[in-house]
Amino acid sequence: MRFLFRWIVRLVLCLLVMVLLAGLFFGKKDLPAEILVQKYGQPPSQFMNLMGMRVHYRDEGNRNDTVPLVLIHGTSSSLFTWDSTALLLGPLRRIIRFDLPGFALTGPHPQRDYSMNMYTRFVDSVLIRLGVRHCVIAGNSLGGAIAWHYAIRYPAKVNKLVLVDAGGYIPKDKIELPLGFRLAKMPVVNNLVKWITPIQLVRKSVEDVYGDKRRVTDALVDLYSDMTLRAGNRQALIDRMQLGLGEDASAQIRTIQIPTLIIWGDQDHLIPVSNATQFHNDIKGSELIILKGIGHVPMEEVPWDFARALVPFLQKK
C-alpha cells in the first residue's frame, strides 16, 4: 500500500512537471483587445456598443443595394473569413459582416451566453442598429446554423438564405473535430487550453478544415492565432463547446420556405457532405452546389469558385 501511494505521488509530480514545462515552452498570454484592434480593427472596420460588448463589424460595398448580404462566420473564426467574398462581390452588393460574441475582436459575452437564442437576438440587434429591414443572410458552420435559425424566427426580414457547410443536424457518422475543438471539449484538459495554445495547435486546427492543406498560409495561421488569443476568447470557446451539438433540428429546418442555396465542400470532415443532401431534401426548392476537393470553409479555400456558385443565386429575382 505504501509503495502504491509513493507511485501515485511520483506520477502526480511528473504530471505537474510536464504541465509546468508545457506552460514554459508553449504558454501563451491573452492578447489585450486594444492591441488587436490597432492591428486588425482599422477602417473599414467599425465598432458598436451592443449587448454589453464592443462589436467589431464591417459595412461595405454597393451603398445603393437595399437588400444587403449579411455574412456570418463559424466557430473560432472571424469576419475576415469573408474577406475575398467582400472583395469580389462588393461592386454588386452592400455587405455586412461582424465578429460573433465569443470570437475575434468582439470577444466574450458578458454573461457567457453562447446559446442559439442569444446569437439570433444578437444578429437582429446588429441589423436593427444598421437600419437593415430586409437582407440575404449567409452563414458558414456555426454561422450557417445561426442564419437558418434567424430565417425561421424572422422570415419577413430574410429574402434569401445561403448555407455554407452549415450546422443543423446531429451527425450520423463519426466526425473529425479540429484538434483545438477536441481539447476544448475535454474536462480538465480544457483548462490547459486557456493557457497553452501553441501556434502548432492553431495550424493543425486550420489545416483540419481545409481540403488542401497547402492552401493554409503562415499569415492565415497568425490571424487565427491572434483571434484565439484575444482576452477571454479561449474561455468562451470552452463555454461554447460545452453546449455540445444540441438536438436534431430537422423538424425546424423543414419549415423554411425562403429561397435557399446550399454550398458544401465534399472534403468537409467536420460537417459531412451528407448533411448538405439532408438540408437539400428538407428545404423545398433549395439549390445544392457541391465543390469537389474542398473542405469546411470554401469561401476561404477557393474564393473564386465560391463566388461563382453564389452570384447567380443572388441575381435571381
Image: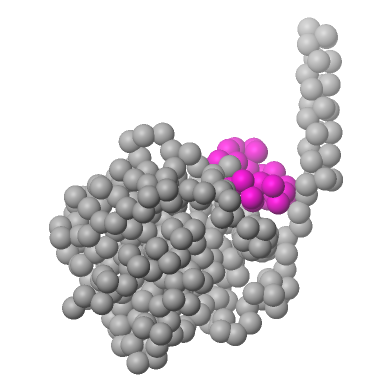
The answer to whether 280 is drawn above or below residue 78 in the figure is above
Magenta-drawn segment: 181-205
Q: Say if residue 295 shows up in the picture.
A: yes
Residue drawn at x 19%, y 50% is 281
Against 114, is 242 above or below?
above
Tag count: 0
| 131 in magenta | no
Q: Is residue 158 visible?
A: no
Q: Main secondary structure of the magenta part?
A: helix
Q: How are the residues colored?
A: one colour
Residue at position x 72%, y 49% in the image: 198
In the picture, the quarter occupied by the N terminus is: top right
**Can residue 188 be found in the magenta stretch?**
yes
Query: Above or below — where is 304 with respect to 23?
Result: below
Residue at 79% x, 22% y is 11
Q: Quadrant of residue 252?
A: bottom left
Q: The C terminus lies in which quarter of the figure?
A: bottom left
Q: Position of residue 24 (x, y in %)?
A: 84, 45
